[in-house]
């Protein structure tokens, strides 16, 4: 925790039911006094596919919830990517549906978290959808860096929340994108500005694309 220019180690978070090899801490996100920590168990066979919510009270962190998908399977990769904004969390599951991928939206009411929606891209050419996720307010961005043929250029999908309904608003792509270069991982958003990584762009030099509404 930061105080002025000094940062002090405040806590070490662990899962209440953690086992090896969960890879707890593979993904992390924070909003205010709430943190989400994801796992990435290899194949989901030996560890867990889950995301854990922790809340801070003064200097004490307490596990509030363990998030899992209502239709989860061992190889879904649920928890490999996590994001949170306020009382809404988005969890990626890029291995779902034989690697097509989905993302799940969870919402908190007081201290209870519930799965609100399962986000899926509108076209059938994406792959690894949910490999990266980000959220700001009621807008989420979901990365899909490895689409199926013939595109193979990657994409990022913008969803907006209205009440309990999530609607796909836009598919973001690189204006100068080339094949097999990972556009869509990672992603970030703040307000009306989104960033999309393109990690293998130009012989793996990489680039980041900025989109603004």
Image: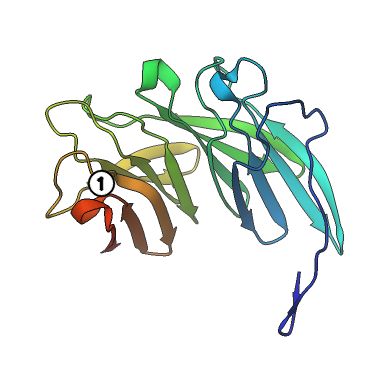
Q: Quadrant of residue 85?
A: bottom right
Q: Secondary structure at mark 1?
A: strand
**Residue 73 higher or lower than 59, as above or below:** above
The structure residue drawn at horizontal position 42% and vertical position 35%, both measured from the top left corner, is 130
Q: Is residue 97 left or right of residue 38?
A: left
Residue 180, how many percent across, how many down?
21, 39
**Residue 69 higher or lower than 60, as above or below:** above
Q: Is residue 105 left or right of residue 47?
A: left
Q: Is residue 203 left or right of residue 108?
A: left
Residue 213 in sight: no
Question: Which quarter of the image is occupied by the N terminus?
Answer: bottom right
- Seen from the viewer's position, the closer of residues 194 and 200 is 200
Residue 88, how many percent across, how many down?
58, 46
In the rendered image, the residue lying farthest to the front is 203
> Badge 1, how many Cα within 10 Å: few under 14, some, many 20+?
some
Residue 166 in sight: yes
Residue 23, how many percent across, how many down?
65, 34
In the rendered image, the residue lying farthest to the bottom is 4
Question: Which quarter of the image is occupied by the C terminus?
Answer: bottom left
The structure residue drawn at horizontal position 40% and vertical position 50%, both measured from the top left corner, is 186
The structure residue drawn at horizontal position 87% and vertical position 63%, both measured from the top left corner, is 59
Q: Is residue 35 left or right of residue 92?
A: right
**Residue 117 higher or lower than 108, as above or below:** above
Mark 1, residue position:
170
- Seen from the viewer's position, the closer of residues 193 and 94 is 94
Say how the picture is coloured: rainbow
Residue 129, how many percent across, how many down?
36, 33
**Residue 52 higher or lower than 209, as above or below:** above
């Amino acid at each position: 925790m930061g105080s002025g220019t000094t940062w002090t180690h405040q806590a070490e978070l662990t899962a209440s039911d953690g086992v090896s090899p969960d890879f707890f801490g593979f993904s992390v996100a924070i909003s205010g006094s709430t943190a989400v920590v994801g796992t990435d168990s290899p194949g989901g066979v030996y560890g867990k596919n889950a995301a854990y919510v922790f809340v801070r009270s003064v200097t004490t962190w307490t596990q509030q919830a363990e998030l899992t998908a209502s239709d989860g399977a061992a190889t879904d990769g649920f928890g490999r990517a996590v994001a949170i904004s306020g009382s809404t969390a988005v969890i990626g599951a890029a291995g779902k549906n034989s690697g097509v991928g989905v993302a799940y939206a969870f919402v908190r009411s007081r201290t209870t978290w519930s799965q609100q929606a399962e986000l899926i891209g509108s076209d059938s050419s994406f792959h690894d959808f949910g490999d990266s996720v980000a959220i700001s307010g009621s807008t989420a961005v979901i990365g899909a860096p490895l689409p199926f043929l013939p595109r193979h250029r990657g994409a990022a999908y913008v969803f907006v929340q209205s009440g309990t309904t999530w609607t796909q608003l836009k598919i973001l792509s690189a204006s100068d994108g080339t094949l097999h270069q990972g556009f869509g991982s990672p992603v970030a958003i703040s307000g009306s500005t989104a960033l999309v990584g393109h990690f293998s762009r130009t012989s793996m030099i990489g680039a980041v694309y900025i989109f603004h509404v």
